[in-house]
Image (tube, grey):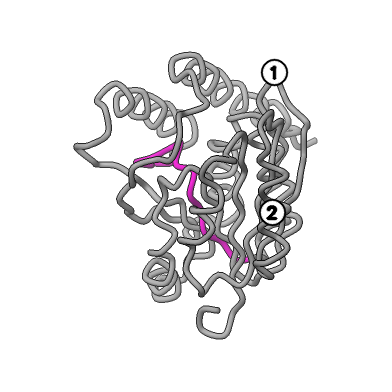
Amino acid sequence: MLDGRTVSLVMPCRNEASFLENLIDEIPDFFDEIVCVSNKSTDNTVEVGTRIQKHVPRFRMLQDDRTANGIGYGYAHMTGINAAEGDIIVCADSDGTYPVEDVPQLWRVMQDKGIAFTSCTRYPDRDIPMKLQLGVKILNAEIALLYGLRIHDSLSGMWIFTKDVVDQLHLTEGDWNLSPQIKLNAYEALGTRFKELKITQRVRYGETKQNYFETGMKHLLWIARNRFKKRNSIQPCV
């Protein structure tokens, strides 16, 4: 718990069986609940998770195998967020790259500044490859131009928010595009109660599931398409 509030950790996963148990062992005790959602795992991730569930009371293993163009990252997140019971919800990839142990410090800043939704930015960070930093900068610039939101890390996979804002997020994207969507929707719904806070990325477990160039191009197109879809949905006053 944090300040008398229960805390849920939501983690999407695919083929994480080889290190899932070690990852869960590392998660701090202030998390009251860990919701892990397997999406299209072809190894024994679900079996390992089911075994963990039997001896770790706060752990739940769920499964959502829906995909959009072969990717189910967003669907896994949506299932986990909807299942989470905590007053505070933390979302982080299940590869160990995000410092979930820093949540108490981040939460204190959120409380002090009246923040309801935090997107945890990894940038600037000299240890992240320049080609990845460049790709994120391009997406950041597109978001600033089209939405007026100046952001450092449009693709961060770690978010902290209060459960009472979930209904305002209106999440629909089943693939990687859930990552920019959740930030843009939170910004649109919450205004100044949406903020970025700095974190330091850790070394990942396992290999990335992404083709960075292909994913980046899809993000670029989705961000533009989403903006003009919103603009066209505004009905003129009569």
Category of crowding for the residue at label 1, using alpha-carbon neighbours closer than 10 angstroms: few (below 14), some (14–19), many (at least 20): few
Q: Decide which of tag 1 and tag 2 comes sooner along the chain.
A: 1
Tag 1–tag 2 contact (CB < 8 Å)? no
Residue at image point 44% right, 15% down: 213
Asked whether residue 215 is drawn in magenta, I would say no
Q: Is residue 35 left or right of residue 150?
A: right
Query: In the rendered image, which quarter contains the N terminus?
Result: bottom right
Report the front residue among 159 and 192: 159
Q: Amino acid at mark 1?
A: Asn
As displayed, is residue 92 above or below residue 220? below
Query: Horizontal and vertical percent for residue 143?
Result: 45, 32
Query: In the rendered image, which quarter contains the C terminus?
Result: top right
Residue at image point 51% right, 74% down: 30
Q: Is residue 204 left or right of residue 221?
A: left
Residue 69 disc label? 1
Which quadrant would residue 78 be assigned to in this image? Answer: top right
Which quadrant would residue 64 be assigned to in this image? Answer: top right
Point out the stretch of residues depicted in magenta: 149-162
Which residue is label 2 attached to? 81
Query: Horizontal and vertical percent for residue 205?
Result: 43, 40
Query: Horizontal and vertical percent for residue 178?
Result: 61, 36
Asked whether residue 152 is drawn in magenta, I would say yes
Residue at image point 44% right, 42% down: 156
Q: Amino acid at mark 2?
A: Ile
Q: Secondary structure at mark 2?
A: helix
Report the front residue among 97 and 167: 97
Query: Horizontal and vertical percent for residue 184?
Result: 55, 41
